[in-house]
Image: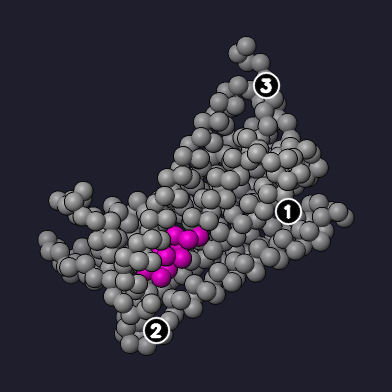
Amino acid sequence: MPGRPISLQLGSCASSSPEGMNNTLNSSSLAPDLTISPTVTWVYFSVTFLAMVTCILGMAGNSMVIWLLSFRVQRSPFCVYVLNLAVADLLFLLCMASMIGLETRPLLTANTSIRVYEGMRRIKYFAYTASLSLLTAISTQRCLSVLFPIWYKCHRPQRLSSVVCGALWALALLMNFLASFFCVRFWHPSENQCFQVDMVLSSLILGIFMPVMILSSTILLIQVRKSTLLWRRRPRRLFVVILASVLVFLTCSLPLGIYWFLLYWVGGLPKVVSLLYICLSRFSSCLSSSANPVIYFLVGSQKSHRLQESLGAVLRRALRDEPELEGREIPSVCTNDEI
């Protein structure tokens, strides 16, 4: 009957807040019962379906990028970053798809499903942190290459990209380990400790990496615009890839991080508002992690040969670092100065 509220089992849409997390861990299902209208129910299932489809397509695209960069494309310093970013995005999408599957149709017993769900949520947080830090490193290194071109070409350490990627993975793992450790340690005395620890670590991550990413991307955009107007050259495809990836991340994936602050500082939000926001932010974060392979294809492909080139050739062209003169094409090169 229209207008009659119904009861619906929801997943992480409620469990991200302290109260929702407590109810989730103390109940026999993955989430508490929320009484919402049929319209909100329809929106929830529609957005959840779109998020699952986006996860599947994104996993396929990132898997293709990983395979091409591992076996088909010679690795440049930037290719190393892209490879690690694709791995982080693939891991994030895999965890998100698993969480959605457990929310809609748990395949395990209640206690086991809750443990698996919490494990997927922790790994998703780890992948999100790694993706954010890697994207920040990409934009920062490109900014340095524009501001200090002589140093970048002559004095940059040869293994800088691999070392930075390893350090960022280790940092993301350490942050996630500390969050999990304190959450388990303070589980029984105060279940709100889990959320408070996550808030502290999220504040550090967003407070450090986000301003650096925005500043370096802004400088890069200004420099690219100036060189384009001065030398009448097309912007390097590599710079277009970086700026597009950062823009998509800030537009789509950042709301997921803001959601934690919104729940922590703004109390008493209506359940419907909180539900719709977390579902939409979850879909947008899936879209962000799935967008990079599409960006590589659109930037690297030529209009006249868009459907005739191999994916390896398109990816090589998208990741090359040579400038292009107006109306000319330079052969695709991805230098092998770092393996």
Spatial distance from mark 1 to mark 2, Cα to Cα?
41 Å
Element assignment for label 2: loop
Q: Is residue 80 magenta?
A: yes
Q: Badge 3 is on which residue?
A: 6
Element assignment for label 1: helix
Question: In the rendered view, would you say 229 is above or below 24?
Answer: below
Spatial distance from mark 1 to mark 3, Cα to Cα?
29 Å
Nearest to the observer: residue 207 or residue 52? 52
Residues packed near mark 2 inside 10 Å, few (<14), some (14 to 19) or many (20 plus)? few
Q: Badge 1 is on which residue?
A: 195
Amino acid type, label 3: Ile
Question: In the rendered view, would you say 274 is above or below 96?
Answer: above
Please identify the residue farthest to the left as the structure is shown.
327
Label count reads 3
Residue 222 appears in view: no
Residue 5 appears in view: yes
Q: Residue at x 66, y 35 (%)?
A: 10
Element assignment for label 3: strand
Amino acid type, label 2: Gln
Q: Residue at x 67, y 20 (%)?
A: 5
* On-image quarter of the C terminus: bottom left
Task: Please report whichever mark, 3 or 2, sits nearer to the chain's N-terminal start.
Answer: 3
Please identify the residue farthest to the top as the structure is shown.
1
Q: Residue at x 87, y 55 (%)?
A: 189
Residues packed near mark 1 inside 10 Å, few (<14), some (14 to 19) or many (20 plus)? some
The quadrant where residue 175 appears: bottom right
Question: In the rendered view, would you say 232 is above or below 28?
Answer: below
Q: Residue at x 31, y 67 (%)?
A: 73
Location of residue 201 in the rendering, given as x and y in whole percent from the top left corner = 66, 62
Question: Magenta span covers which residues?
Answer: 79-88
Q: Badge 2 is on which residue?
A: 158
